[in-house]
Image (cartoon, rainbow, N blue to C red):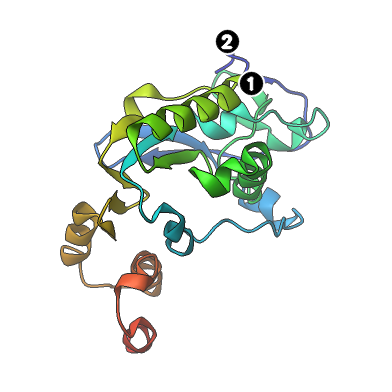
Amino acid sequence: MLQNGIITPSNSPWSSPLVVVPKKNGDIRLGVDYRKLNNVTKQDAYALPRIDATFHTLAGSTVFSTLDLYSGYWQIHLDEHDMEKTALPSPIGFYEFSVMPFGLKNAPATCQRLMNNAFGNLDRYHALVYLDDIVIFSNDYASHLKHFKSVYCLLKSMNLKLRMEKCTFFRSEIKFLGFVINEQGISTDPDNVSAVKEWKIHKSRKENESFLGFVSYYRSFIPNLAEKESML
């Protein structure tokens, strides 16, 4: 991270603790606990799009590509005067981020605003953007080639890099943000449905809230969800 310019040595009066977060596959991920910083940060009210409410723009499309930005937040540089607020201690020194780290309360709003401003009309006609995830949609292959090129040129002009192993190109069906999308329409991702079936009985309020948040994401596919939620 230091060699790649993600972090830089710091003399900041600010400090947030480094934390270790276990992954599902057994690996670990290093993160920073920015809760105290977030508590004194003014809220950016810029709204993220409601994915289920924007999928109507995909109606009639038959060809899709999905793009994933490589460490999307890290491609957004911080203002020089704000870098010190992201400082963190480590076993090898004291550092601060030069790019936007994960965990800041306004990071999602900042990322979404940047992408919306960059894509402009493209976002309405043949591209759907949610944070650092992009889906390109078209009615036929010839149109899709043009649409793909316009999005690619836009990303290149902004010097935004893709994580190629997570991208899919010119498909008749894709998985995007927990949904399956094809010419027939939108459906839930079977993998996520399986996760709900295997969900363990809740033992705490926090676990219950986590479950309700997960289920609410698919509200448009669950009749009378509000009534069912009230029972929990």
* Tally of marks: 2
Image coordinates of residue 66 in percent, x first then y, are 38, 36
Q: Is residue 94 left or right of residue 52?
A: right
Quadrant of image for the N terminus? top right
* Picture residue at 56% right of the left edge, 49% below the top: 124
Give the Cα separation between the discs numbered 2 and 1: 24 Å
Residue 120 appears at what percent x and percent y?
Answer: 65, 42
Residue situated in front as seen by the camera: 156 or 32: 156
> At numbered mark 1, what does the secondary structure look like: helix, strand or loop?
helix
Q: Residue at x 36, y 48 (%)?
A: 61
**Which residue is rendered at x = 66% and y = 49% of the image?**
106
Location of residue 94 by image quarter: top right
Question: What numbered label is drawn on residue 157?
Answer: 1
**Amino acid type, mark 1:** Ser
The quarter of the picture where residue 221 lies is bottom left
Residue 148 percent coordinates (x, y): 45, 29
- Amino acid type indicated by mark 2: Gln
Q: Name the residue beneath numbered marker 2.
A: 3
**Relative height, residue 130 to residue 155 (above, below):** below
Q: Quadrant of the C terminus?
A: bottom left
Residue at the spot 21% in from the left edge and 61% down from the top edge: 193
Q: Which circle's residue, 2 or 1, is located before the other in the chain?
A: 2
Specify the farthest residue to the top.
3
Q: Is residue 129 above or below residue 193?
A: above
Local crowd at mark 1 within 10 Å, few (<14), some, or many (≥20)?
A: few
Instruction: Describe residue 222's horizontal placement relative to residue 118 as left or right.
Output: left
Residue 129 in view? no
Residue 84's quadrant in the figure? Answer: top right
Q: Which tag is nearer the camera, tag 2 or tag 1?
A: 1
